[in-house]
Every structure is written in C-alpha cells, then in structure tokens.
Amino acid sequence: MLQPGRLLSAFPVTFECKTTFFRDPSQVSWHRAYVTTTEAIKLLEKFRAGGVSREKVLHAFQAAPVADLGFAQVDTHRALRKGFPEVIFGAGKTPEQVVKIAGKLLEREKGILITRINGEHVRALRKKFKQAKHHPEARCVTIEKEPLAKRPGIIAVVCAGTSDLPVAEEAAVTAEVMGNRVERIRDVGVAGLHRLFAQLETIQSANVIIVVAGMEGALPSVVAGLVSKPVIAVPTSVGYGASFGGLAALLGMLNSCGSGVTVVNIDNGFGAGYAASQINALVEQGAEAKVSSSRPTRKI
C-alpha cells in the first residue's frame, strides 16, 4: 500500500501553480469522486498502473479548493488535507445558510458534522436530508451517507459531572463521526473519587482520554496521574460566580501538575474530539507500519 508520505517521491509529476481557477470545483466532474486522502492515493495508484492519464490526475488535484456560496467560502479540500470534511459551526448562521453549506459538502462527502445548532437548524436539516441525525445533548447534527469504518482502539470521554454532559457529548459525537470507537464515562468528578477508580481499567485501556470538567477543573490532573496515555482537558463554563464562566477551570487545567495534559478552550468539546481522533489515527498508522515492517521480505 502506498503511504501518503511517499506520494511525491512515487510520482515525479510537476504541478504548476495557477493564479486563476474556477470558483466552484463542482464544475470539474473528475474531481468530485476524489476527496479524502485514501481516495487520492487510489487515484495515484491507478495512474501508476496506467489506468488514468496524467492530465486527469492533474485536473483532479488542480481543481479549486473553494466553493463560493456568496455568504460562505466552502473548503472542499478539507478532507484531503485533514482526513475529514469541513465542520459547520451552526451558531450565528441561519438555517438556510447551514443547509446550503451542508448541501455543497455532501455533493462530494460521505458524511459531515454540524455543531452548535438550535431547533430551527435541526428542522431545516431534517427536511432537506433524510440521513440527518440530531444529537440533542451534544447540540450537533450528523449526516452520514456512509459511516466511516471504525479504527481499532478507543477514545475515552470522561465527564466530571452531569452538568458537563453537553460538552462531553459534543466531544464524543465528534470523535465517533470521524471514525473512532468512544467509551463514555460519566459523573466521576473529584467530589467522589471512588467513582473514578471503578472505571480506571477502561480509562487506562484507551489510546487517548478526553476529560471534561467545570468548577475548579481538577479532574484532568487526577486522571493524568493514573494513565500513560495523552489527556485532553476540556474546561466547561459550569460553576458558581467565582468560576468566571469557566476561566477558573481553564487556568487550573493549564497549571496542571499532571504530565501529558493538553488543554482546549472553554466548552470546546468539538476541538477535543477532533484532536483525539487525530491522535488515534496516528496510533492506527503506527500499528499498520509495525505490521508491515515485521513481514518477511521475499528474496529473488
């Protein structure tokens, strides 16, 4: 299998930079079938085998990465660069805008994620797309024409309290739609550490752990001291007045003495789920590389 890092060396093709291009890549019919990194690799392998011309390969990769909707510039190459399409942030957008952006992405993509939506967004999306699935607690909608295959290993989403669940669920839904297995562990905050210890075996078996907490934000430090895996801390805006809308939890997590703790912004479950998915993808790639290198070479 051709590895992404070897694409350029494997195919010595010169790409010219263009200063003018179509604003909407939907005009390029060949490009529409090749979006993700995996599909791009397949196209290049087909070229190597002589199944497609160099001109068509160039046409596919030189297509404009932007679809201009007037009110939005839709990044149609996001999946090629990042492994998952552009995610739609619903807050501040009208239902009509969200539907149009989703429709443009779904012309090429098998699945998309819309975060921070309200009831009007949900109704408009369900009316337009049969596959639209609402995740009320996460305040998200997913639309999957074909779900991504699940990676081996799990991402654990550890939630301190029931009030933190909306942010924790946003992280979990994000990780799941990006092709990961997620284990949810709820209501195990530091006010009763025995609850956390009862779930410790599951937490320690995860490839990466997302820890969501409000108030003083102490839970990520505790978890980090008990595991050997990366911990992504998510402060929430849950708490009384002196929590300053999550600022106290954010500062507590940034000042954590637990090793291996990284911190995302207040209430940013999406950012944590995305980062955890990227880490888990690296674990999968490392495992595949190890299996490949362990295979005996055939002598001729």
Image (cartoon, rainbow, N blue to C red):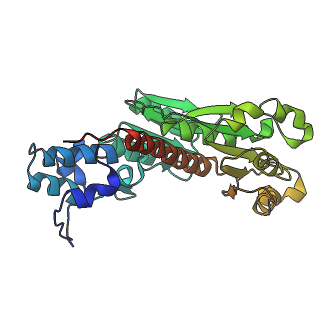
Q: Is residue 59 left or right of residue 147?
A: left
Quadrant of the image occupied by residue 67: bottom left
**Horizontal and vertical percent for residue 9?**
24, 61
Q: Is residue 170 left or right of residue 18?
A: right
**Horizontal and vertical percent for residue 211?**
72, 45
**Nearer-the-camera pick, 188 or 120:** 188
Answer above or below: position of 242 versus 199.
below
Visible residue check, residue 140:
yes
Q: Residue at x 47, y 41 (%)?
A: 287
Q: Is residue 67 left or right of residue 288?
A: left
Q: Residue at x 71, y 36 (%)?
A: 203
**Horizontal and vertical percent for residue 64?**
25, 59
Q: Give the tally of numbered discs.
A: 0
Quadrant of the image occupied by residue 202: top right
**Horizontal and vertical percent for residue 80?**
34, 51
Quadrant of the image containing the N terminus: top left
Q: Residue at x 50, y 29 (%)?
A: 133
**Nearer-the-camera pick, 9 or 261:** 9
Answer above or below: position of 66 versus 43.
below
Q: Residue lying farthest front?
A: 299
**Nearer-the-camera pick, 183 or 243:** 183
Q: Residue lying farthest bottom?
A: 19
Answer above or below: position of 41 versus 243.
above
Visible residue check, residue 68:
no
Quadrant of the image containing the C terminus: top left
Q: Residue at x 10, y 46 (%)?
A: 52
